[in-house]
Image: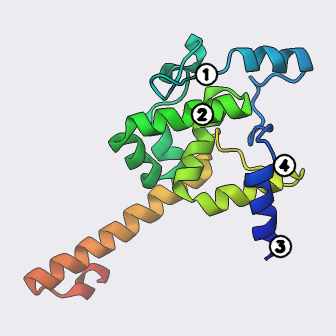
Amino acid sequence: MMILKQLFLTLCFLPACYSFVVSPHRATTTSALLAAKAKSPKFNPSTEQWEYTSDDQKPEAGYDISGTLLRQGPKPFFIRLLNPDQYEQAVLKFMATDSCDRMVAQGNMDAFFENAQDWAYYRTQAEAGAYAPDYVTVNKEKLVKTVIWGTGITSLLSWGAYCLVTGADFNAIFR
């Protein structure tokens, strides 16, 4: 119940003024933060869209769709693939509200689309000064383990489906 109360207060009453992930590109001084805020994407009320104000906010400045798949998996990958405008608007809005660079915004949006509850929990923890996951960096060790595990399970399930359809002995693979 306490976590829900913290989450409610954070989302409703506190301005989102901290970036979730510390980026090497993020400004740290007050004047640099103000300059970053001046360069942040702007909302156009006539089109009801967030718009770029500089080249470092465009999609080319961040990682591509394969980076989304590697960092957070298939769910945000398909959201980005099937709804590119919604994804782009979410990234631009995050950049504007948090005054962060594109990589940090993309990492946070990918994490949000993967699991919004976990993202909100970690966001609340990070704002309180606790653990803040790095959504920008690809964890190569975890990626290798996932690929090996996925390949093994997929092979085993494929063999099971083959045996089920053809009537072959499932245990023949282990002999």
CA distance separating discs 2 and 3 = 28 Å
Identified at 75% across, 61% down, the residue is 8
Residue at 70% over, 33% down: 97
Give the residue number, with chain letter if any, for mark 1: 41
**Colour setup of the view:** rainbow
Which disc is residue 93 wearing?
2
- Whether label 2 touches label 1, CB < 8 Å: yes
Q: Is residue 138 visible?
A: no
Residue at 49 percent of width and 42 percent of height: 68
Comparing labels 4 and 2, the label whose residue is closer to the camera: 2
- Residue on which the image places disc 3: 2
Q: Nearer the viewer, residue 61 or 173?
A: 61
Q: Could you tell me residue 16's position as x and y percent?
A: 76, 41
Q: Amino acid at mark 1?
A: Pro
Label 3 element class: helix
Kindly identify which residue carries mark 4.
127
The amino acid type found where label 2 is placed reads: Lys
Front position in the image: 158 or 81: 81
The residues tagged by marks 4 and 1 sit, at their Cα atoms, a distance apart of 23 Å
The residues bearing labels 4 and 2 have C-alpha atoms spaced at a distance of: 19 Å
Labels 3 and 1 touching (C-beta < 8 A): no
In front here: 41 or 82? 41
What is the C-alpha distance between the residues marked 3 and 4? 16 Å
Above or below, 54 relative to 70: above
User: Mark 4, mark 1: which one is toward the viewer?
Assistant: 1
Q: Which kind of residue does numbered mark 4 sit on? A: Glu
What amino acid type should be assigned to the residue bearing mark 3? Met
Measured Cα–Cα span from mark 2 to mark 1: 7 Å
